[in-house]
Image (cartoon, grey):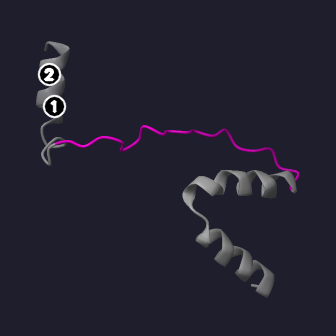
Amino acid sequence: MSAMREELHYLVDQLPESELHPALELIRGRLDEPAPAERDLPFFASFEAEPDLAERHEEILRSEMGR
């Protein structure tokens, strides 16, 4: 790997997550490839719950869905 690529990797790793999208768009703009369809999921893992929520998911779904 060239020194420039290594520096680019290092600099990208230093960016906060919120700054990655603009940098990614800039680099994609230099390529002839279309941007892949993006899935922006800001709600993912954005809540807190009891530790056993995953273990009780079937019970919770049954009670919520009226099964």
Foreground residue among 63 and 41: 41
Kindly identify which residue carries mark 1: 58
Query: Badge 2: how crowded within 10 Å, few (<14), some, or many (20+)?
Result: few
Image coords of residue 21 (percent x, y): 66, 51
Query: The magenta stretch spans which residues?
Result: 31-49
For numbered disc 2, what is the local secondary structure?
helix
Q: Is residue 33 left or right of residue 53?
A: right
Q: Does residue 40 show up magenta in the picture?
A: yes
Give me the residue at 30% from left, 40% from top. 47
Q: Is residue 50 above or below residue 61?
A: below
**Which residue is most to the top?**
66
Kindly identify which residue carries mark 2: 62
The reply to whether the C-beta atoms of the residues labelled 2 and 1 are less than 8 Å apart is yes
Q: Is residue 41 left or right of residue 66?
A: right
Give me the residue at 64% from left, 56% from top. 19
Q: Quadrant of residue 34?
A: top right
Q: Quadrant of residue 58?
A: top left
Q: Does residue 16 show up magenta in the picture?
A: no
Image coords of residue 38 (percent x, y): 63, 40
Task: Characterize the magenta stretch by its predominant secondary structure.
Answer: loop
